[in-house]
Image: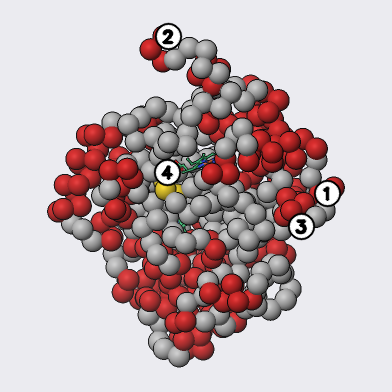
Amino acid sequence: MRIGRVLSERGLLEITRCVLVGAVLLLSWNAMAATAGEIPKGDHGAATMEHQISELAKLLPAGDLRKAPPGFDPVVWDAFIPTDNVLTLDRVKLGHKLYFEKRLSADGTVACATCHDVTRGFTDQLAVSEGIKDQNGRRNAPTTLNVALLQTLFLDGRSPTLEHQARLPIVNPIEMGMPDGAAAVNAIGDDAEYQAAFRKAYGRPVNYEDIGRAIAAFERTLIFVDSPFRRFLAGDDGAISAEAKQGWVLFNEKGRCVTCHPINTSNPLGTDNRFHNIGVSARHQNFGVLARQGLSALQQDPSEQKLDELALSTDMSELGRFMVTKNRPDIGAFRTSLLLNIAITQPYMHDGSIETLWDVMDHYNKGGEPNLFLDGGIEPLALTEAEIDQLVEFLFTLTDERFARQNNRQRDRQREQARKERPLRDDDMAFRLKLAFEK
Ligand code: HEC
Ligand code: HEC
């Protein structure tokens, strides 16, 4: 009996020792990996939350995060901030904590930062996102960089504000999977740190609405618009290469990109904030059948939570804006993407179906994918290979300087990939040599 107890105490000590040694090894391995430039990985392939937090600290400017970012008119900036969620440091700090909080998910493995990862362009760089229990959605995660400047949120614009948007992933069954807002509040509500932080930020106990507000306040500090192209527009002629300048001319003229992606000093994002069918979904969907299905699903349950589920986990995702407006011209239409920081948020399009910027150019060059609802602005462009290279070079000048290294790495990687394979290239269509019925 006594011997048994001594043994089991010894055993316990031994186990504790092993666990401790293991933990120390793991920590030093992570530290080594970090110094060697490798990113320490956590759940679902995202960088660990600790690593992301330390990387973010290096990225954010030192000044007062509540003030208008450099180069922004303070009056215009203030107009972006809702009166019921004025930016304060306590709110931003709370939102920062919540953004990296895995306890807000049903299985404790997913935070906002899992799919909007600081080390991966504030997205996950996957075709479609992976949520709790490794479930895949249907849509590509857009970046959370510069979302403060958008007029609507989500790729179909179904959310009007950042405050509103932030509450939806928490209760989406395949993202963070909480049964309801109360469950999210319960998950962090016993934590004394959170209780104090909510009191300080909003003067109220932990509640679901303020979770959304605080995260929104934090997201408003993620302004990353300092690209070489912005310096070029401001008059620094040497900021971008001659090839990129040619690309900028093509962007405005022969490529016709500017009709949907306006980009200038007052609108640095490169989106018209409107919705167009450019034929991405048309590659693999029958819109007629889907639209009938969509209308009947929405009739059965018109709630915003249902719409969120249909968009993220069914084929109806491909209907895009139509599921929000039920207007025919919106079938297969998605919000014009931001072009700022485009180099570090691959793969591309709402379904992540296009791998490189060269492939994006091939898609446009052949006039998209023909379908009944194709936007009138999409038609064959007859761009030569040299012109495609120039346009792509221009797109690589839209990355914030703080991501310059990632930008260069992506340029090399994508160029290499494009040399191997150009799955969407179709010169017959691009130059109208042969039309579909002549093949
Ligand atoms: C499982 C992955 C996943 C998680 C977790 C997740 N997101 Fe997202 N996020 C996405 C996807 C996918 C979309 C696009 C969905 C759509 O458009 O229908 C998106 C869209 C967004 C957008 C809209 C961006 C735009 O361009 O309109 C914002 C903002 C955003 N997420 C913030 C958050 C916040 C804040 C959280 C945490 C509360 C969060 N996300 C959690 C995958 C995720
Ligand atoms: C008719 C409007 C329209 C025109 C013209 C247009 N675009 Fe787009 N662009 C869009 C829309 C809408 C999307 C998003 C489509 C989707 O997700 O399915 C998009 C997506 C993109 C993307 C991918 C963004 C991402 O994050 O996934 C890039 C890059 C892009 N466009 C560049 C260009 C370039 C370069 C041109 C000119 C050759 C151009 N666009 C012309 C509307 C347009």
Label 4, on which residue? 276
First reached walking from the N terminus: tag 4 or tag 3: 3
Q: CA distance from mark 4 to mark 2?
A: 28 Å
Q: Residue 143 has which mark?
A: none
Q: Alpha-carbon neighbours of circle 4 within 10 Å: few (<14), some, or many (≥20)?
A: many
Q: Residue 234 has which mark?
A: 3
Amino acid type for the residue under numbered disc 2 = Lys
Label 2, on which residue? 439
Amino acid type for the residue under numbered disc 4 = His
Q: Position of residue 167 (x, y in %)?
A: 39, 67
Mark 2 falls on what kind of element?
Answer: loop
Amino acid type for the residue under numbered disc 1 = Asp
Label 1, on which residue? 237
First reached walking from the N terminus: tag 2 or tag 3: 3
Q: Alpha-carbon neighbours of circle 1 within 10 Å: few (<14), some, or many (≥20)?
A: few
Q: Nearer the viewer, mark 2 or mark 3?
A: 3
Q: Quadrant of residue 415?
A: top right
Q: Alpha-carbon neighbours of circle 2 within 10 Å: few (<14), some, or many (≥20)?
A: few
Q: Are marks 1 and 4 in contact (CB under 8 Å)?
A: no
Q: Position of residue 364 (x, y in %)?
A: 53, 31
